[in-house]
Image: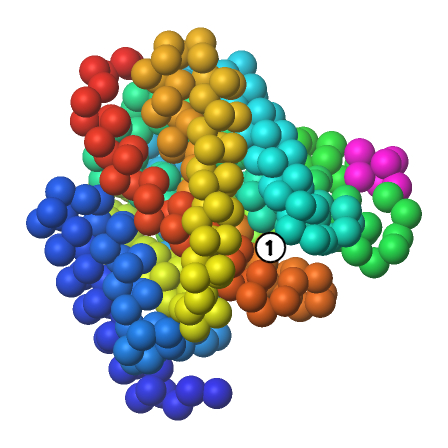
């Protein structure tokens, strides 16, 4: 357990490193999030050892990414999401199927039995909405059609990834896969998203003007809604960031939307760097200190990038080839999602330390490679709103 002064020193180091990394990244025309992740690698246990992932930092990291997705939701209207619903569904579906198939084939070819291969493949599936959302926000392109498709697909992606993880976890423990039980869990997750996304936004449109007329500051209520829905989404088997994103969409329907965007900026500036720096700090470079490990990592990362690019791109062909490419690239980062699945695999004895390091490193590499590619594509692509 860290003492109070040790925690404060860690916070100071993380925050300053994040600012320095982001500044350097922007100086060479890269999104700031790339610098924050690489700063985490530099100050983490594998290089300088100035900080180590700890409970206080994990808590701040979780709060940071929750607030980030809340702010992204603030810039996303339900009517805009409805317009890209079909494309988002196809991107989410194919963006799960293709990586899962390729990931399981690689793992089985590497010597795992099929049960462990399927668990390994689950780490290839889910997209890190937090990393892509930060890039889209930094570039000011959240209102573009491709951005709305990516964010909508990330929600669908998370639901399907949750279902797959439930199946492959049952296979590891030798339990029977009860299709009826999984169907109920899936229905609950979809119902939660639909209920909040459709009826929550409708309720906000109707009630917010009355509250605004009384000159009540709704920011505390909005933040409470963000934290509450983030918690509820975890109870339905979804990532906390999905609930936070939905809370932002609900609040975006109120007349105080612009005020919320302005008032939450200081919170975002303080909290979100902890998520990205800690993501980088979790990589264990010593597990990759051999030619064989590096070649395997290159192959695994290539499979992860290409499978999402193909799956997401095929689902977004209705946007044209350039739009499909933007969406495919936007779906590539695994980020914290891949790290979480790798941690589950290590705890369950499915992964060796080397396999765990490969999956974590793959998740981080996809998170570092994607932002500059996405930024390059979006800067060269005409606005398709």
Q: Is residue 205 magenta?
A: no
Question: Where's residue 204, x and y in %?
Answer: 46, 30
Secondary structure mostly seen in the magenta stretch? helix
Task: Return the residue nearer the eye: 14 or 280.
Answer: 280
Tell me: 50 left or right of 85. left
Task: Decide if residue 119 is in sight here.
Answer: no
Q: Which residue is pictured at 65% across the width and 63% down the height?
A: 351
The picture places residue 331, in percent across and down from the top left corner, at 44, 34
| Highlighted range, magenta | 178-183
The kind of secondary structure element at disc 1 is helix
Residue 288, image quadrant: bottom left
Q: Is residue 221 left or right of residue 176?
A: left
Q: Is residue 304 visible?
A: yes
Residue 136: quadrant of the picture = top left
Label 1: how many Cα within 10 Å (few below 14, some 14–19, many 20+): many
Relative to residue 98, is residue 122 depicted above or below?
Answer: below
Is residue 135 depicted above or below 151 in this figure? below
Query: Which coloring applies here?
Result: rainbow
Residue lying at 33% horizontally and 49% vertically, measured from the top left: 368
The number of callouts visible is 1
Of all residues, the one furthest to the left in this rendering is 27
Q: Residue 207: where, in percent of width, then height?
A: 45, 30
Residue nearest the observer in this picture, 17 or 72: 17
Give the percent coordinates (x, y) of residue 114. Answer: 77, 47
The quarter of the picture where residue 302 lies is: top left
Residue position marked by numbered label 1 in the rendering: 341
Q: Which residue occupies the extreme front position in the image?
A: 291
Residue nearest the viewer, comparing 315 with 112 = 112
At horizontal 46% and vertical 17% (from top left) the residue drawn is 316
Q: Residue at x 21, y 67 (%)?
A: 17
Q: In what quadrant of the picture does the C terminus appear?
A: top left
């Amino acid at each position: 357990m860290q003492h109070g002064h040790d925690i404060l020193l860690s916070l100071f180091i993380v925050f300053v490193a994040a600012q320095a990394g982001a500044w350097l990244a922007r100086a060479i025309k890269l999104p700031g999030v790339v610098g924050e992740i690489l700063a985490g690698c530099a100050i983490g246990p594998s290089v300088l050892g100035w900080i180590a992932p700890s409970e206080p930092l994990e808590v701040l990291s979780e709060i940071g990414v929750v607030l980030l997705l809340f702010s992204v939701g603030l810039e996303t209207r339900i009517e805009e999401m409805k317009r890209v619903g079909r494309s988002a569904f196809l991107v989410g579906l194919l963006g799960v199927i293709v990586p899962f198939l390729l990931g399981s084939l690689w793992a089985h070819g590497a010597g795992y039995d099929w049960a462990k291969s399927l668990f390994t493949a689950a780490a290839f599936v889910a997209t890190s909405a937090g990393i892509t959302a930060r890039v889209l926000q930094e570039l000011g392109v959240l209102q573009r059609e491709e951005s709305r498709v990516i964010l909508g697909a990330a929600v669908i992606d998370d639901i399907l990834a949750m279902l797959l993880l439930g199946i492959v976890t049952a296979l590891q423990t030798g339990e029977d896969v009860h299709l009826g039980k999984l169907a109920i869990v899936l229905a609950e997750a979809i119902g939660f998203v639909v209920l909040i996304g459709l009826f929550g936004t409708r309720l906000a449109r109707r009630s917010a003007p009355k509250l605004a007329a009384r000159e009540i500051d709704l920011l505390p209520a909005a933040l409470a809604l963000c934290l509450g829905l983030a918690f509820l989404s975890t109870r339905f088997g979804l990532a906390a960031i999905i609930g936070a994103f939905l809370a932002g969409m609900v609040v975006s329907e109120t007349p105080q939307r612009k005020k919320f965007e302005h008032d939450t900026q200081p919170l975002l500036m303080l909290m979100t760097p902890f998520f990205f720096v800690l993501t980088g700090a979790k990589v264990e470079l010593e597990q990759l200190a051999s030619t064989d490990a590096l070649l395997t990592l290159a192959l695994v990362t290539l499979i992860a990038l290409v499978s999402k690019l193909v799956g997401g791109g095929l689902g977004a062909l209705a946007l044209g080839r350039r739009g499909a490419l933007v969406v495919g690239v936007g779906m590539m980062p695994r980020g914290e999602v891949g790290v979480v699945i790798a941690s589950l695999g290590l705890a369950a004895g499915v992964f060796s330390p080397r396999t765990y390091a490969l999956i974590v490193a793959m998740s981080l590499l996809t998170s570092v490679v994607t932002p500059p590619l996405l930024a390059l594509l979006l800067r060269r692509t005409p606005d398709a709103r």
